[in-house]
Image (spheres, rainbow, N blue to C red):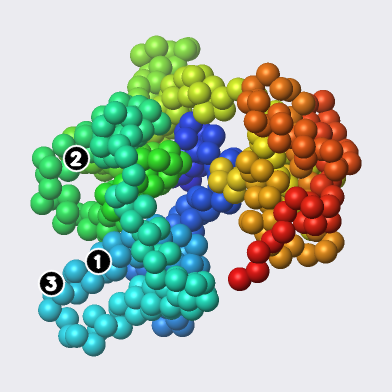
């Protein structure tokens, strides 16, 4: 099954949503995926290490560290831990184990959450009005904002899922559900451990979509978490289908004919698991291959080429204490790609006095720099007049094809044009 695992892993990597977004937003938004994959691997071997006295403590220590790291990395890991805790604790409750054992088994899942959120709160409590800050952000991620794609957020998420995984991905999941439903009692008893892992793989992405609808509707890459369930469905589906057909432990007989003597037949036994590996490999490769044929998927997301002329101009003449203003241009913190290149914000203003109203306590070594777009065709008369007045007492520092940057004489403006008011 090693070969099958490698093929499935490669297919997961080659899914369009993974192939595109993991190269763009992994470290800024989706690095939690690696932590989740490692955590699932630990959960798979939970039964194995629980039987080893010394290895059990090393295993629990490693799981605790991974869980704490996951909690400190992304809110999504809370859903993973919650489902994992349910998978562990529900059988204990059903078997009426003593309360002490239930509490002890819960420690490795609950303590990382308490410690991680506690450390987060200790840090954020230093921010003024932190309570409102957290509350407003949670509201924004859960339900605020308008509808998307002409419908509600849940509809937008479904459309986004189809755009990334196609109807074939939905069909796979429907087939899996139908297959399990046909022999649910038998499967749940026979594949008890497997269903526990399936719950950890399938349920957390669903919980994230239902709870953080705004985040999932706005940011397509939040649906990266569904890549593992979709690919894993191919493997599990074939396992259950062969079980239904009573062929999981059977062998296929292949008759081989010797060329010298056609009457002498030899039988070659091919175990069903080997055939499953072949089918899985071909299916997953075809699945990801069909999705990657859609060139418009990449073209639409990459968009057209963007000129970073003004950002590169600022970056090439970067000075930490500089403060940039403009009557026509602005570089904000969000979206972050522009300030990531320029390293400096550019504040859009309506008049020079506004500079001193915004920053009445600029340090003496801070240069007030005005960015001017050389093209005037899109400027109003007022903007042109403001620029001309500002440039009367200013000197040009550097320029590019379409932009000039001037240093404003702050002493002249504070003494003659604007006098800061003192409270």
Disc on the earlier residue, 3 or 2: 3
- The alpha-carbon separation of the residues under discs 3 and 1 comes to 12 Å
Q: Quadrant of the C terminus?
A: bottom right
Q: Which mark is residue 388?
A: none
Which type of secondary structure does the marked residue at label 2 adopt?
Answer: helix
- The residue at the point 19 percent across, 69 percent down is 90
Q: Which residue is mark 2?
A: 177
Q: Residues within 10 Å of mark 3 (few under 14, many from 20)?
A: few
**On the picture, is 403 further left or further right than 64?**
right
- Residue 104 figure quarter: bottom left
Residue located farthest toward the front when viewing the structure as drawn: 416
- Above or below for 52 versus 362: below
- The alpha-carbon separation of the residues under discs 3 and 2 comes to 25 Å
Q: Residues within 10 Å of mark 2 (few under 14, many from 20)?
A: some
Q: Does residue 210 appear in this view?
A: yes
- Above or below for 27 versus 393: below
- The alpha-carbon separation of the residues under discs 1 and 2 comes to 21 Å
Q: Which residue is mark 1?
A: 86
In percent of width and height, residue 13 lies at 51, 39
In percent of width and height, residue 392 lies at 84, 38
Q: Report how many numbered discs are placed on residues in the image.
A: 3
CB within 8 Å, label 3 to label 2: no
In percent of width and height, residue 418 lies at 72, 54
- The residue at the point 77 percent across, 56 percent down is 414
């Amino acid at each position: 099954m090693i070969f099958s695992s490698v093929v499935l892993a490669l297919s997961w990597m080659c899914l369009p949503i993974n192939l595109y977004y993991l190269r763009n937003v992994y470290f800024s938004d989706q690095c939690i995926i690696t932590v989740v994959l490692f955590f699932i691997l630990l959960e798979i071997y939970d039964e194995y290490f629980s039987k080893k006295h010394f290895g059990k403590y090393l295993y629990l220590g490693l799981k605790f560290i991974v869980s704490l790291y996951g909690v400190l990395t992304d809110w999504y890991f809370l859903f993973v831990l919650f489902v994992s805790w349910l998978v562990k604790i529900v059988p204990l409750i059903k078997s009426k184990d003593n309360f002490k054992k239930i509490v002890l088994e819960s420690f490795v899942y609950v303590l990382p959450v308490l410690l991680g959120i506690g450390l987060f709160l200790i840090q954020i409590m230093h921010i003024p009005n932190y309570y409102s800050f957290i509350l407003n952000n949670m509201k924004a991620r859960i339900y605020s904002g308008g509808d998307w794609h002409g419908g509600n957020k849940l509809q937008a998420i479904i459309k986004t899922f189809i755009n990334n995984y196609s109807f074939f991905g939905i069909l796979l999941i429907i087939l899996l559900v139908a297959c399990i439903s046909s022999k649910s009692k038998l499967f749940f008893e026979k594949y008890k451990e497997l269903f526990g892992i399936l719950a950890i793989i399938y349920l957390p992405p669903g919980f994230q979509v239902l709870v953080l609808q705004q985040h999932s509707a706005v940011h397509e890459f939040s649906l990266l978490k569904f890549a593992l369930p979709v690919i894993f469905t191919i493997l599990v589906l074939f396992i259950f289908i062969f079980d239904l057909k009573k062929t999981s432990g059977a062998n296929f007989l292949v008759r081989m004919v010797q060329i010298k003597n056609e009457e002498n037949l030899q039988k070659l036994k091919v175990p069903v698991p080997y055939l499953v590996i072949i089918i899985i490999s071909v299916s997953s490769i075809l699945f990801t291959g069909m999705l990657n044929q859609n060139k418009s998927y990449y073209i639409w997301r990459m968009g057209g080429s963007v000129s970073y002329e003004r950002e590169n101009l600022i970056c090439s003449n970067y000075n930490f204490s500089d403060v940039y203003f403009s009557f026509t241009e602005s570089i904000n913190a969000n979206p972050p790609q522009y300030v990531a290149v320029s390293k400096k914000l550019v504040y859009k203003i309506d008049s020079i006095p506004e500079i001193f109203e915004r920053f009445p306590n600029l340090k003496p070594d801070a240069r007030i720099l005005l960015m001017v777009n050389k093209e005037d065709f899109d400027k109003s008369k007022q903007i042109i007049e403001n620029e001309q007045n500002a440039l009367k007492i200013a000197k040009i520092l550097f320029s590019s094809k379409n932009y000039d940057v001037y240093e404003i004489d702050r002493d002249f403006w504070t003494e003659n044009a604007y006098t800061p008011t003192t409270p």
